[in-house]
Amino acid sequence: MTADFHEIAPEPDRLVEVRPLAQALRAFAQARDWEQFHSPKNLAMALTGEVGELVEVFQWMTEEASRGAAQEPKVAQALRHELADVLLYLVGLADVLGVDLNAAVHEKLQINAAKYPVEQAKGSSAKYTEL
């Protein structure tokens, strides 16, 4: 039996609600006259840098250690801060581009459900073109 995307997340549900965060980011940038620097290119580059810093937290950890990383206080704080930075830049980028992240997430989940039917993808890490 295939789990239909609409059974998991029917449309009017808001899976992602970032408007208050986007508004707070806009106010933060406006107060500092930083909007001039917040082009899509610059925000995408900053996002990439923050993802790199998140990845750096996991560098050299074993798979097992990475699963428990958030349980170690010092590592947990670094993870929280880097995840927050990634989210802040992602939301800021979507806001500057006028992308509704909730709609984008709904659309992408539907696409992924079609690409990776449960019957073919369950327990497999293969790319959809290899299923």
Image: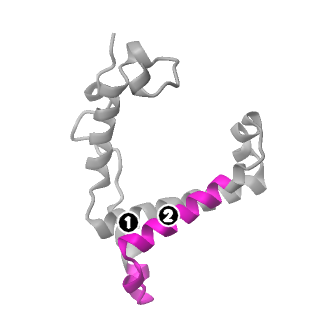
Height in image: 62 above or below 30?
above
Element type where label 1 sits in the image: helix
Q: Residue furthest front?
A: 130
Q: Position of residue 8 (x, y in %)?
A: 33, 28
Instruction: Indicate left or right for 11 with 115 as reference.
Output: left
User: Which amino acid type is marked by label 2?
Assistant: Leu
Looking at the rendered structure, the secondary structure element under dot 2 is helix
Numbered label attached to residue 93: 1
Q: Position of residue 56 (x, y in %)?
A: 69, 56
Question: In this view, which residue lies farthest toward the left?
Answer: 12
Q: Position of residue 116 (x, y in %)?
A: 38, 24
The residue at 43%/22% (across/down) is 130
Query: Which one is earlier in the sequence, the residue at label 1 or at label 2?
Result: 2
Q: Residues within 10 Å of mark 2 (few under 14, many from 20)?
A: many
Residue 21 lies left or right of residue 104; in this view the side is: right
Q: What distance separates the C-alpha of mark 1 from that of mark 2?
A: 8 Å
